[in-house]
Amino acid sequence: MKKTLLFFLAAMIALSAVFAGGSSESSAAAPAAEKKNEITVVYLDEKPWHDQADEFTAATGIKVNYINVPFPELRQRSLTSFLSQDSHFDVIHLRSDYVHEFASKEFLEPLDDLLTAEEKAAYNKTSLDNLSFGGHLYGLPRYYWLWQFNYNTQILKEAGVEKIPETWDELIAITPQIKAAGHEVMIAGLDDEIITYMFYVLLNCEGTTLIDEKGMPVCNNEAGARALDTLKRLVDSEAISKHSFEIHGSNPASDMFCQGDFAFCFASPATYSLAMNPASSRIVGMVETAVVPKGSVGSASWNEPAGLGIPYNAPNKEGAIEYIKFCTTAEQQKKVAMQICRVSTHPEVNSDPEILAKYPQFSSINNQLEYPSGIVNSIHAMEVLDTTAELLHKHLDGTLNTADTLKAIEKALTEIAQQ
Amino acid sequence: MKTDIKQFLRKDHTRSLFLAPALIFIALFILYPLLSSVVLALSDITFPRGVLTTKFSGFKNFAKILKQEIFWTCVKNTVVFVICRITGTFVMGLIVAMIVVRAKGIMSHILKTLFLVPWALSDVVNGTMWDWMYNGKYGIINEILLKLHLIDQYQPWLSMGKTALWAIIFADVWKSVPFVSLMYLAALTNVDRNLYEAAEIDGAGVVQRFFSVTIPSIKPIIVITTVIQSMWALKVFDLIWVLTKGGPANSTMTLAVLAYRESFMYTRIGSGAAIAYMLCLLTLIFIVSTLSLSRLGGNED
């Protein structure tokens, strides 16, 4: 009995060593058999995307297996499929930071050879650059997730504010007036790493940015100091509501804005539509949109250019590229914009009369897009965002002063870039 | 050789056959992952085109994480979390058990059922519920504290570095108390009543009887629950992830959350495995300390 048990144990240890790390490289999984007439798409459970998939099937005969995944899980789901060599997905959602991260690890199929020069020319060059890495294109743009500056006209009237603030300093200056009227000033979803987005916006407003194209920090300078000071003053004066640090992203910020307690909301363009919907808003007819307040140099916003891409091990790449081309045309982007208020990457769609009639807030979008609006483009984007957020919180709670915070950010981001 | 095989086949292998399924399960789901993660912790892991490539790097991953400030922040947070959970569940669990043990008839059944409700919730549900309760704009905890004049305005408990960890500990202790109180209840019902009578006759008061009779009688159960609670507390992940994801500014980041972040968010699987092993080491330290301290009182059980 003892011998049997010992033999069994020894066999398991030996097998574990062989499978776990006996060889320095695991062999790649054999590619799955190509599925000519169907593709698998993974994205959000929203009607316009499902409608698009159905339209594509009707137009091409290619069946779309649509997998619903909540937005916070999209990146992780894609990453898990890459790491497990699962050849299940043909089309995945991409943001420009995902492109850097995934393309650097060769997880994505370059699209350069799958598109003609004419097809590429149909897209806005900036939007293509956002989805490129190392000189290759990895995704086609589907929409912009651009933050806009919305305000509640009723609250500003009650507070006696006649002029919409055009700079962050002006916003801080009217904060006591708004608070005296019993309201809070600005809500934005700044939980976790999203506070770095706010810092990014303020850096752009001062004419600088967080990291360069090589991932090296460039914010430890006078402009960076001004941006950091502005952030601290916005938080200390409660121009940015402390509730902003409890909520993650645009959607919950828009929800809170629509309850009527906040004068301003810095969130996606869908805020306006939500505010105009009597089913979800207490401030119907009281919302307008302005250009994001400026810093010393100009305005800026946060923008997550979203697109569609193809995993390196997709079973049906031909079907996938057809789907991507179909979904990202100006016509399809206009349909989506009309349904769920997504900012198109085609400027002509954003200024289309039909769109403007339904969503007046789109009138400032092309103007806002003239100013810097971007995302942290780094192969270590998540770590850059998390690390910067940690140091920003230390600055905001008084643990680090401005100079030390910028030095710490520079040191930490340099280490990350040099990994 | 043939004779050996024949002899082997003639033997009765019933015991081995009955044990085999459990051994296979342990080998597949415990031994294999354990040994694999040793290899991962001692390697540089990369994924060119999704192909897992391991290159032996010795203790480089361990050396790297030991130099990082965030690792020591997580160790501190983890130790605080565990100590507070053990203390909180001990105190509250004992109070609840002593209330229930004195209840009679239907009241006893009602109390036992009510006190088990928190334990029946999943960690994610528990986390979501407390997230709503702690909300700085609409949360009921703020409303209660405001009405009791303990605060003068609503606070965002989970987004302030100085309160976030305590808020999570409170939510965790609330959920963990029922299991501990159940264990103590079972122990208390088995304490010999004669000991209390004898102590009373000797002139011992309520407090003296509690410390001289009750605690020594249930000490083995206290040790067992402390060991179990520390093991569970060390690996807590769901509650922290749902409530704060380790923020703000890593004030609620524990070793388990850090291991997850390194492995699955940053895809630094070698580092993540190394952190997981450091967590195992910390678990061992806690268990050995608890068992050693329990032996100081002279109880060898």
Image (cartoon, coloured by chain):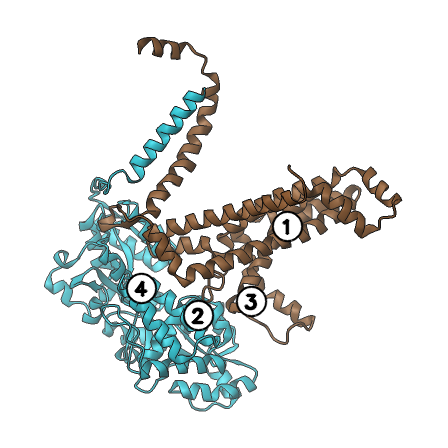
Chain colours: A cyan, B brown
Q: Quadrant of residue A230?
A: bottom left
Q: Please give the residue where the numbered disc 1 appears in the rendered image.
A: B177
- Tag 4: amino acid: Ala
Q: Quadrant of residue A370?
A: bottom left
Which sits in the foreground, A337 or B232?
B232
Q: Specify the label residue A381 is tagged with.
A: 4
Question: Circles 2 and 1: CB distance less than 8 Å?
Answer: no
Which sits in the foreground, A73 or A414?
A414
Q: Please give the residue where the numbered disc 2 appears in the rendered image.
A: A189
Q: Work out how far the residue at label 4 is from the one at label 3, CA to CA, in angstroms.
A: 28 Å
Q: Work out how far the residue at label 1 is from the one at label 3, CA to CA, in angstroms.
A: 21 Å
Question: Circles 1 and 3: CB distance less than 8 Å?
Answer: no
Counting from the top left corner in percent of width and height, residue B105 is at 79, 41
Mark nearest the camera among 4 and 2 is: 4
**Dot 2 lies on which element?**
loop
Counting from the top left corner in percent of width and height, residue A229 is at 40, 82
The subunit letter for the residue under badge 1 reads B
Q: Work out how far the residue at label 2 is from the one at label 1, CA to CA, in angstroms.
A: 34 Å
Question: Circles 2 and 3: CB distance less than 8 Å?
Answer: no
The subunit letter for the residue under badge 3 reads B
Which sits in the foreground, B36 or A389?
B36
Q: Earlier in the sequence, mark 1 or mark 3?
A: 3
- Tag 2: amino acid: Gly
In this rendering, do the residues under marks 2 and 3 share a single chain? no
Q: Work out how far the residue at label 4 is from the one at label 2, CA to CA, in angstroms.
A: 19 Å
